[in-house]
């Protein structure tokens, strides 16, 4: 009796492990690279595998993490977002201006995030989802225009921020971990739930797979894309709030390398460049890989420009991996169709 009851439990356990392993298929390469990089740096650099340094890595990628999560939904829908760095910068300027009005700090942060949502959905969402313009051109134009607006609004000067609430969000600790880490974890769980457990997440994948098929199946593609771009804008604005809190001032110029780093993290995580495949789990690993790599370069004393060079190389490698993955998928489908055709030809027809 004991042996007979043990077999089903063992089968269920092995089935669960197999399912978890299969679920890592899209982001398995970056997972292996991240583990290998951590092992290498822990041997090479004595100060790498310490609690302080690991927390530093997590907090240093908080801004990129938030932007990349929002950009993942854009990528899954078949788009690409080049404007997130500019949106984060203008959100920081908006934060400093609203704090001077005397509104409660918490209300100001909410308004700034809603401002990012409105900016993303009205500018990018309408032009891409409703008008149907090319997503690369739209986001490049909005990045350029928003960069100009940041310089105009800020007067090309940094503005110092004194806000206890913003400080708590960006710097303070909670239960031994800094608040940005808690914000990262909460946002990841929310995005993972939306991606895997809601009709909205299903619609994003459908649109990325085929816009025409999504429309024919009854999905309101324009509305879904408006929400997707609004979410991306809101996450970029939240990232801007965290960035302002960390440095204590709003930047007069956007960091336009942020969108490229986010795209690199998304592609490293296994999301397809053309949309319809991937997810936030792989994106999170991609962001951590970039953060760990940059931290390792910093510990070794490498100049900042080497970090930029390495990020560029990572982006090229990620695009190349996406191309190879797409080619392998097409070859697999073609082989299946070829085998099916040969079976149909060889099967005798009976009357």
Image: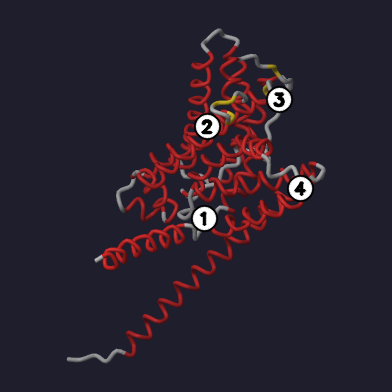
Q: Residue 280, how many percent across, how many down?
A: 49, 46
Q: Which mark is residue 183?
A: 2
Give the CA distance from mark 4 to mark 1.
Answer: 38 Å
Indicate which disc, 4 or 1, sits on the residue closer to the N terminus: 4
Give the CA distance from mark 2 to mark 3.
Answer: 25 Å
User: Which structural element holds mark 1?
Assistant: loop
Q: Which residue is mark 3?
A: 252
Select label 4 or label 1 by which is in front: 4
Give the CA distance from mark 4 to mark 3.
Answer: 35 Å
Near-viewer residue (70 or 157): 70
Note whether residue 158 is visible: yes
Note whether residue 91 is visible: no
Indicate which disc, 2 or 3, sits on the residue closer to the N terminus: 2
With respect to residue 230, does 45 lie above or below? below
Indicate which disc, 3 or 1, sits on the residue closer to the N terminus: 3
Q: Which residue is mark 1?
A: 274
Select label 2 or label 1 by which is in front: 2
Q: Residue at x 38, y 39 (%)?
A: 223
| Whether label 3 touches label 1, CB < 8 Å | no
With respect to residue 221, does 338 lie above or below? below
Near-viewer residue (172 or 153): 172
User: Which structural element holds mark 3?
Assistant: loop
């Amino acid at each position: 009796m004991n042996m007979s009851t043990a077999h089903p439990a063992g089968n269920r356990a092995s089935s669960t492990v197999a399912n978890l392993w299969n679920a890592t298929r899209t982001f398995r390469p970056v997972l292996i690279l991240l583990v290998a990089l951590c092992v290498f740096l822990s041997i090479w650099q004595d100060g790498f595998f310490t609690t302080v340094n690991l927390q530093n890595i997590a907090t240093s990628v908080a801004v990129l993490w938030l932007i990349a999560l929002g950009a993942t939904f854009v990528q899954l829908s078949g788009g690409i977002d080049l404007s997130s760095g500019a949106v984060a910068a203008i959100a920081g300027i908006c934060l400093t201006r609203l704090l001077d009005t005397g509104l409660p700090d918490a209300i100001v942060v909410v308004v700034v995030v809603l401002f990012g949502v409105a900016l993303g959905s009205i500018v990018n969402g309408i032009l891409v989802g409703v008008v149907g313009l090319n997503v690369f051109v739209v986001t490049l134009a909005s990045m350029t225009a928003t960069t100009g607006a940041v310089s105009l609004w800020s007067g090309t000067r940094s503005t110092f921020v004194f806000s206890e609430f913003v400080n708590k969000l960006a710097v303070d600790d909670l239960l031994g971990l800094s608040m940005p880490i808690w914000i990262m974890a909460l946002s990841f769980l929310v995005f993972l739930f939306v991606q895997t457990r809601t009709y909205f997440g299903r619609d994003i994948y459908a649109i990325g797979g085929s816009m025409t098929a999504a429309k024919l199946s009854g999905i309101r593609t324009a509305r879904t894309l408006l929400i997707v771009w609004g979410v991306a804008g809101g996450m970029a604005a939240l990232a801007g709030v965290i960035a302002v809190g960390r440095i204590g001032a709003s930047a007069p110029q956007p960091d336009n390398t942020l969108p490229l780093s986010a795209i690199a993290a998304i592609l490293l995580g296994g999301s397809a460049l053309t949309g319809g495949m991937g997810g936030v789990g792989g994106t999170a690993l991609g962001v951590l890989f970039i953060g760990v790599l940059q931290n390792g370069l910093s510990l070794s004393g490498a100049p900042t420009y080497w970090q930029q060079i390495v990020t560029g190389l990572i982006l090229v490698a990620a695009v190349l991996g996406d191309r190879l993955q797409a080619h392998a998928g097409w070859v697999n489908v073609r082989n299946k169709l070829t085998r099916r055709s040969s079976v149909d030809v060889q099967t005798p027809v009976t009357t």
